[in-house]
Image (spheres, rainbow, N blue to C red):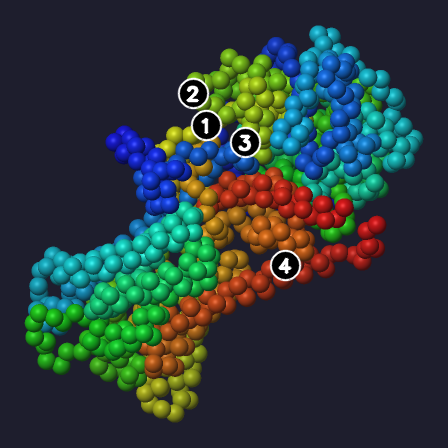
């Protein structure tokens, strides 16, 4: 039964710099990289070395825990270098792209096959990392059977990329991807759409799925929020989820037999002169994406959205799961008596500033923390933006105390870092909540292994 | 501003590693971050942050207390000149008299409290937190005007050390620090915190005949009669606050202005305030019902005071708005706050009426509920946990 869910708690933060719906041509990137840090909980095992020629879709590294899960090159070319950081942790595998792309051979997908066979096909063609799971918000464990698969078909983050625009004309590919995913679960495939708009066109050719409509502010598009309201997770249960653009990638594998990582990405934020969409690939270096478009002054280039994205730079790379590049000014200047300032350009959900006077005002926010880290003092502020039937502060405290049993009882299985992103934004004590939640998830996952 | 910036920049090397005053870095840091919000940028998680921080929160509470402080100063002067038979003294003279009595208490409270916080921060090498900015203002407002300054200082030492720092500082305390100071003063120096000599400063002149400087509740506790004391004052005076009492708590109008500021900005919990009123009114109603059956005539009169008057004849209002709403020592779940607020109002009025040793029950009710707040939260959270556990079907053990 399709459900309608109304989210009461959350925050729609209006920011300047929403991408205009036109695709701007850019030059190809001169270097691409796959970053293991994009995949939390992954210990990579290298399968290539410097100088190797690879095709798009050829594995670069695999998961040490399950070597069938392959992480593949987004483009064809030569492995330029393998960047390592402290303790020889692999930070990036860089590829210099060919001028003409070569793809690996992808077999026909086993249309009559069972879950195991379809999984095997997905893993071999490199698409498995796009299937993630809750709990833990990591790449799905193929030995588990999910009770359902969810696709969040809209994006409610501030400056969100418009998925309808980005996936224009891809209805058939999306439908093909869904047909593949249907094999992976005995349960339903849920397409969760924005209730306040008409259903997006890219789902129009998909059949045999359940469409649920979500109303309300961000984080209505977070998969964790959607799962919590439709069919909450209990201990021992697993739900898988895939992003719509990755469903299209799987569809392309099935129909066009190639691992195509090109996608339409939004370039947004108050730090760019012209917010627009561009076509680029996963792992592309960001310089052609943002060059000649940055406003003067120190800007922060973020791969991903403003709440959960990874801090990069023009020399950084587009993350595997990211559909946008956000640029905002760095706020690294001290401010004289800033805590007394009543500057209307500052934003606060409390009424100590003036955001409440004009709910439609668009803000130009920078990266300043506006205060130092403190202990928990104020209560009740997270609950305003945390639409779960869970208590966020005791859960965070349980993670800080590394009390695994208490974490389980308080609902760690139902959340991921992104669900705490708004709590982190409004936190008076400036606590690093997303980092803390990730740590908690890693602890519990390790305990359960 | 540039002068301040260059001053801090020039002085900083002395406090950093290797500098002469390296171990006093927390003190330097406290002053620098007071003058300048640091240029720290988000390095993990979300890339933007709300402009609110603890300093802004605390300063909003201080703004909310200013009406009580200002009225308190005026009232100290007013009560003084009335006691000396000079009720028509000029407003400014009354206000200045009060200010000269109150400001030293405020200065002592802040100096001693912040001094201790600085010392703890330097010894333990953590940064100085802003929590004391509010407690430092509250402590004088809940003391009687005639209390010697050294008693204020000792109470502050007790409150900051035992009430806060030994637990880990701001955010870690179990009890409300300002009330801990008052409780200490109350039990250590009872003759300076109760009776009828301390609420009004009567120095420098001759008292009018038959003058009693007791508070309304003080009188009710002693006599139980609605005679001298209670019946002397009109409802208007109780609400406006031109009555004897602790410095900041007499004017319900000033408290209401503070409450509006705190509720409007979202800094204090409406749940605690509302339920405290509900609890107090419930207890009042219960007493009104019981007054018919109680044997002793004094008790009967006290119990028969109209239930709603309990909200204006003592420090119920000030305690509810500024003390009960302390987020750290109170209940932290929204449901918990409803119970916590209700029980504060309920017990506060109960202690006030039943126990002659404690004319005002709010201080003890709040301290009691501070201790029980974690238990209330525990049960609220357990109910939520159990609801989720009920969803689980019996599962076989994972391989």
Tag 2 or tag 1, which sits nearer the N-term? 2
Which secondary structure, mark 1?
loop
The reply to the same-chain question for discs 2 and 3 is: yes
Label 1–label 2 contact, CB within 8 A: yes
Q: Residues within 10 Å of mark 4 (few under 14, many from 20)?
A: some
Both marks 1 and 3 on one chain: yes
- For the residue pair A285 and A149, the one nearer the viewer reads as A285
Q: Which residue is depicted at the point 82% across and 17% down?
A: A104
SS category of the residue bearing label 4: helix
Q: Secondary structure at mark 3?
A: loop
User: Which residue was labeled with disc 2?
Assistant: A297
Circle 4 residue? B384
Q: Position of residue A363 (x, y in %)?
A: 44, 31
Side (left or right) of A228 relative to B234: right
Q: Which residue is mark 3?
A: A306
Q: Is residue A164 visible?
A: no
Q: Residue B229 sits in which quadrant?
A: bottom left
Judging from the image, mark 3 belongs to the subunit labelled: A
Closer mark to the observer between disc 2 and disc 3: 2
**Foreground label between 1 and 3:** 1
**What residue is at 68 percent from the left and 18 percent from the top?**
A81
How far apart are the two marked residues, 2 and 4, measured between alpha carbons? 49 Å
């Amino acid at each position: 039964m399709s459900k309608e869910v109304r989210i009461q708690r959350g925050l729609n933060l209006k920011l300047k710099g929403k991408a205009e719906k036109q695709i701007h041509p850019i030059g190809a990137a001169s270097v691409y990289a796959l970053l293991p840090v994009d995949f939390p909980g992954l210990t990579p095992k290298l399968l290539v070395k410097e100088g190797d020629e690879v095709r798009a879709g050829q594995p670069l590294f695999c998961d040490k825990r399950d070597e069938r899960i392959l992480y593949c090159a987004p483009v064809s070319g030569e492995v330029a270098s393998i960047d390592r950081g402290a303790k020889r942790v692999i930070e990036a595998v860089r590829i210099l792209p060919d001028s003409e792309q070569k793809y690996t051979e992808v077999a026909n997908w086993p249309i009559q096959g069972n879950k195991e066979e379809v999984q095997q096909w997905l893993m071999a063609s490199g698409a498995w990392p796009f299937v993630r799971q809750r709990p833990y918000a990591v790449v799905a464990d193929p030995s588990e059977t999910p009770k359902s698969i969810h696709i969040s078909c809209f994006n409610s983050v501030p400056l969100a990329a418009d998925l309808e625009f980005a996936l224009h004309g891809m209805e058939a590919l999306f439908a093909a991807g869904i047909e593949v995913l249907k094999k992976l679960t005995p349960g339903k495939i849920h397409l969760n759409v924005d209730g306040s708009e008409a259903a997006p066109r890219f789902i129009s050719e998909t059949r045999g799925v359940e469409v649920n409509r979500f109303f309300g502010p961000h984080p209505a598009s977070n998969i964790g929020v959607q799962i919590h309201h439709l069919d909450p997770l209990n201990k021992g249960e697993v739900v898988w989820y895939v992003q719509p653009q990755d469903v299209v990638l799987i569809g392309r594998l099935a129909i066009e037999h190639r691992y195509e990582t090109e996608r339409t990405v939004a370039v947004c934020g108050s730090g760019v002169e012209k917010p627009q969409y561009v076509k680029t690939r996963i792992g592309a270096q960001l310089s052609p994406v943002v060059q000649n478009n940055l406003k003067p002054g120190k800007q922060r280039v973020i791969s991903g959205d403003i709440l959960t994205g990874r801090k990069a730079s023009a020399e950084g790379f587009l993350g595997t799961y990211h559909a946008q590049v956000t640029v905002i000014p760095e706020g690294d200047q001290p401010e004289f008596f800033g805590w007394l300032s009543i500057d209307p350009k500052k934003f606060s959900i409390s009424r100590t500033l003036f955001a409440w006077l004009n709910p439609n005002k668009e803000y130009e926010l920078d990266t300043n923390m506006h205060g130092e880290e403190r202990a928990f003092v104020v209560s009740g502020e997270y609950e305003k933006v945390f639409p779960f039937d869970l208590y966020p502060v005791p859960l965070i405290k349980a993670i800080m105390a590394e009390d695994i049993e208490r974490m389980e009882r308080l609902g760690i299985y139902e959340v991921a870092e992104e669900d705490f992103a708004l709590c982190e934004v409004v936190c008076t004590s400036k606590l690093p909540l997303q980092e803390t939640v990730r740590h908690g998830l890693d602890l519990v996952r390790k305990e359960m292994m | 501003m540039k002068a301040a910036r260059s001053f801090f920049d020039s002085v900083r090397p002395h406090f950093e590693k290797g500098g002469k005053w390296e171990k006093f870095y927390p003190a330097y840091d406290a002053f620098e971050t007071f003058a300048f919000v640091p240029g720290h940028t988000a390095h993990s998680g979300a890339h933007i942050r709300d402009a609110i921080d603890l300093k802004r929160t605390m300063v909003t509470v201080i703004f909310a207390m200013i009406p009580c402080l200002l009225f308190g100063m005026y009232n100290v002067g007013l009560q003084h000149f009335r006691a000396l038979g000079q009720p028509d003294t000029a407003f400014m003279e009354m206000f200045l008299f009060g200010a000269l009595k109150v400001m030293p208490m405020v200065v002592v409270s802040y100096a001693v409290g912040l001094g201790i916080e600085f010392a703890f921060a330097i010894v333990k090498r953590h940064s100085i937190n802003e929590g004391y900015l509010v407690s430092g203002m509250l402590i004088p407002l809940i003391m009687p005007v005639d209390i010697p300054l050294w008693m204020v200082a000792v109470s502050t030492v007790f409150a900051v050390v035992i009430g806060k720092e030994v637990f880990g500082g701001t955010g870690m305390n179990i009890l409300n620090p300002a009330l801990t100071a008052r409780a200490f003063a109350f039990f250590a120096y009872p003759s300076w915190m109760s009776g009828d000599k301390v609420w009004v400063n009567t120095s420098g002149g001759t008292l009018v005949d038959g003058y009693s400087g007791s508070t309304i509740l003080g009188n009710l506790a002693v006599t139980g009669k609605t005679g001298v004391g209670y019946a002397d004052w009109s409802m208007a005076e109780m609400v406006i606050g031109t009555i004897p009492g602790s410095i900041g708590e007499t004017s319900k109008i000033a408290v209401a202005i503070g409450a509006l500021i705190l509720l409007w900005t979202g800094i204090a919990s409406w749940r605690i305030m509302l339920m405290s009123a509900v609890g107090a009114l419930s207890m009042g109603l219960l007493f009104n019902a019981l007054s018919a059956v109680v044997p002793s005539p004094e008790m009967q009169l006290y119990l028969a005071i109209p239930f709603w008057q309990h909200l204006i004849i003592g420090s119920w209002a000030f305690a509810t708005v500024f003390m009960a709403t302390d987020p750290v020592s109170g209940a932290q779940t929204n449901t918990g706050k409803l119970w916590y607020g209700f029980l504060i109002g309920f017990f506060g009025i109960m202690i006030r009426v039943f126990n002659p040793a404690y004319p005002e029950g709010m201080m003890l009710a709040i301290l009691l509920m501070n201790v029980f707040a974690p238990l209330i939260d525990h049960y609220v959270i357990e109910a939520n946990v159990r609801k989720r556990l009920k969803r689980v079907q019996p599962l076989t053990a994972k391989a």
